[in-house]
Amino acid sequence: MIPYIYLYDIIGGQVIDGSYLTWDKTKIKTTHFQYTSDTDKIILGSNSSGYFLIDFQVSLTASGAGAIAYFDIYKNGTIVEGSRTYISIIYYGQTVWNQSGIIICPVYLEKSDYIQIKGSVVGGSPTTVANTSRLLISFIPMAGWDNSAGGRIDYKGSVER
């Protein structure tokens, strides 16, 4: 089975204030990952090291003022270089234009590594919109991967003369 986890936040309303995001619904989770609802760490619990594709999506809203929020992926408490995305929320008169953002980033993970998503803000007080904060982490098959063999590397070696 290919390592995979899909989390999302049904309730929404998480204030973006420099803290790590949480998710209250686990839609799909293989046994490779450890995650408890409403916590901020997703841990690779089995020995399935390799490159994983991290796909984070979120929509934000604000009231009374515009805001600029930015999100980063953290691996073991350290920011993953090149993972930042910005989301601008426009508030004009009495109208708010909600905005969405995504991060798609490959990250090398080994057993016991953990991933977190941190949201920070410049001005305003944005919150997440219900059902829009999603985090998907999936293993990236590499050369030699054979899906029909349960992920085992399949060598067809022979000596050429």
Image (tube, rainbow, N blue to C red):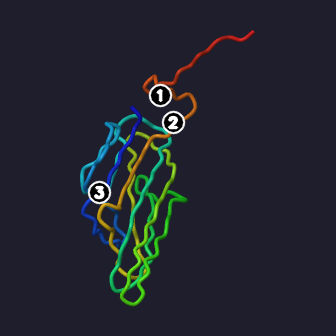
**Whether residue 60 is situated above or below residue 83 in the rendered picture:** below
| Quarter of the image where the C terminus is located | top right
Instruction: Kindly identify which numbered label has been placed on residue 147.
Output: 1
Q: Residue at x 44, y 41 (%)?
A: 110
Q: Nearer the viewer, mark 3 or mark 1?
A: 1
Question: If you read the primary sequence from the N terminus, does the residue marked by circle 3 or circle 1 appear first?
Answer: 3
Mark 3 closeness class: few <14, some 14–19, many ≥20 residues within 10 Å? many
Q: Earlier in the sequence, mark 1 or mark 2?
A: 2
Is disc 2 placed on a helix, strand or loop?
loop
Mark 1 lies on a secondary structure that is helix
Which of 60/43 is in front?
60
N-terminal of the pair, mark 3 or mark 2, is: 3
Q: CA distance from mark 1 to mark 2?
A: 9 Å
Specify few, some or many for label 2: CA neighbours under 10 Å numbering under 14, 14-19, or 20 or more: some
- Which circle marks residue 141 in the picture? 2
Up/down of 101 relative to 28, above or below:
below
Callouts 1 and 2 close, C-beta under 8 Å: yes
Q: Amino acid at mark 2?
A: Pro
SS of the residue under disc 3: loop
Residue for point 45% across, 22% down: 149
For residue 17, which quarter of the picture? Answer: bottom left
Residue 160 shown left or right of residue 77 in the figure: right
* Whole-percent x, y for residue 70 in the image: 45, 69
Residue 156 vs residue 18: left or right?
Answer: right
Where is residue 158 shown, x and y percent of the image? 64, 12
- Position of 132 with respect to 84 (left or right) is left
Q: Distance between the Cα atoms at labels 3 and 2?
A: 26 Å
- Report the residue marked by disc 3: 23
Of 45 and 124, the residue lying toward us: 124
